[in-house]
């Protein structure tokens, strides 16, 4: 990744606010499929790149924590490493909670003697299949069980993002699920033991893995209305929506997804309006101004961009850090 000889000051403040800490590096996962050593070494190197301000957490399966701890020399350089782990999950509430206890033990074992160098403060995990499309009350009961487990194990701080499939029954159940998550978050003490949110998968190995703009818009609107955060993953290497020859389908752009969330938060967009942002294929219609972000005739101040990024659209997982950065350079935004 060869950076052009340009001053960091040329990056517009609105672009910096829009993309700050936006990429969770997931080099262990397809299509990169790097070894743990190489992936973490790359992550450490990216922390010194000119675009390091865009880099957020390192993502790995919870079962690989012991492997990472065995590579202590990788953890010695620079500031503390923040990690997001992929939890084991389970189809039923009982199997989920049993696996959750084991995952929490793995996190505790990892932190023993190394907490000053690396910490796991986020878990991403599939929502139990039994709760897909469930009622708000069932969601609240599940999250209460999560809280009891965290208290019992003494886990000090761990935010949770539940991945939901964007199929018909799951989309119909999003308002109830988001309301349950919002209720859970409102009951947290200060500081919170765990803030919960949702996770959306925007791509995959098959065309059918790419969710429709209608369903992604439904998730953004549901999270916005409930006041809960979401993370995204998969298929978001390109900034702007485009056609992918390999998959023979249109792919989401990470700029579209985050712009849709930022604009939805600021302008209270309804679902069809959010779909229009997600469907935008012309990069020229996105503008990063000195004091605001704009899409077509809608603008959002830098302060409001930052608020939406911190409270609604948090980050997206990518197996490549270089590819999104290179595409942004191609658009002459970096």
Image: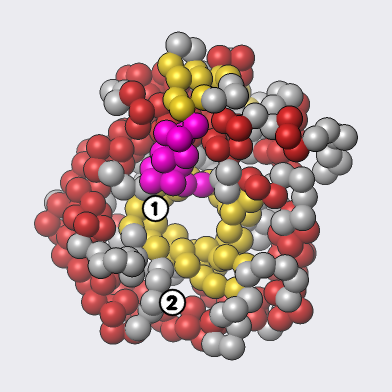
Q: Residue at x 30, y 38 (%)?
A: 224
Q: Of the residues under marks 1 and 2, which one precedes in the sequence?
A: 2
Where does label 2 land, which residue? 103
Q: Which residue is mark 1?
A: 163
Residue farthest left in this picture:
137
Look at the image and tell me whether residue 148 can be seen. yes
Under circle 2, the secondary element is: helix
Residue numbers of the magenta segment: 302-315
Q: Give the residue at x 73% y 30%.
A: 10
Near-viewer residue (131 or 305): 305
Q: Which mark is residue 147?
A: none
Secondary structure under tag 1 reads strand
Q: Residue at x 67, y 67 (%)?
A: 79
Q: Main secondary structure of the magenta part?
A: helix
303 in the magenta segment: yes
User: Is 145 left or right of 272, judged from the image as shown?
Assistant: left
**In the figure, residue 15 lies in which quadrant?**
top right
**From mark 1 to mark 2, how far is it between C-alphas?**
17 Å
Could you say which quadrant of the image residue 12 lies in?
top right
């Amino acid at each position: 990744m060869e950076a052009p000889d340009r001053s960091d000051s040329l990056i517009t403040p609105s672009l910096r606010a829009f993309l700050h800490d936006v990429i969770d590096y997931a080099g262990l996962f397809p299509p990169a499929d790097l070894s743990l050593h190489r992936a973490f070494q790359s992550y450490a190197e990216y922390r010194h790149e000119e675009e390091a301000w865009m880099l957020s957490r390192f993502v790995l399966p919870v079962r690989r924590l012991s492997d990472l701890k065995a590579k202590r020399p990788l953890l010695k350089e620079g500031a503390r490493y923040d990690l997001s782990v992929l939890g084991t999950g389970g189809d039923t509430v009982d199997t989920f909670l049993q696996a959750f206890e084991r995952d929490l033990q793995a996190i505790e074992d990892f932190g023993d003697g190394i907490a000053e160098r690396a910490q796991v403060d986020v878990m991403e995990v599939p929502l139990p299949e039994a709760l897909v499309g469930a009622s708000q009350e069932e969601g609240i009961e599940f999250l209460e069980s999560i809280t009891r487990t965290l208290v019992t194990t003494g886990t000090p701080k761990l935010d949770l993002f539940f991945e939901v499939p964007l199929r018909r029954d799951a989309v119909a159940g999003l308002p109830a699920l988001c309301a349950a998550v919002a209720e859970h978050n409102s009951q947290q003490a200060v500081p919170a033991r765990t803030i919960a949110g949702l996770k959306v998968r925007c791509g995959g190995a098959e065309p059918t893995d790419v969710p429709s703009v209608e369903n992604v818009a439904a998730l953004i609107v549901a999270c916005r209305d409930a006041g809960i955060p979401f993370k995204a993953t998969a298929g978001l290497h390109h900034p702007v929506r485009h056609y992918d020859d390999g998959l023979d389908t249109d792919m989401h752009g990470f700029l579209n997804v985050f712009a849709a969330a930022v604009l939805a938060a600021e302008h209270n967009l309804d679902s069809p309006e959010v779909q229009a942002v997600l469907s935008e294929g012309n990069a020229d219609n996105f503008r990063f101004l000195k004091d605001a972000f704009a899409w077509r005739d809608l603008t959002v101040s830098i302060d409001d961009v930052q608020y939406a990024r911190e409270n609604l659209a948090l980050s997206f997982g990518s197996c490549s850090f270089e590819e999104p950065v290179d595409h942004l350079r191609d658009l002459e935004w970096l």
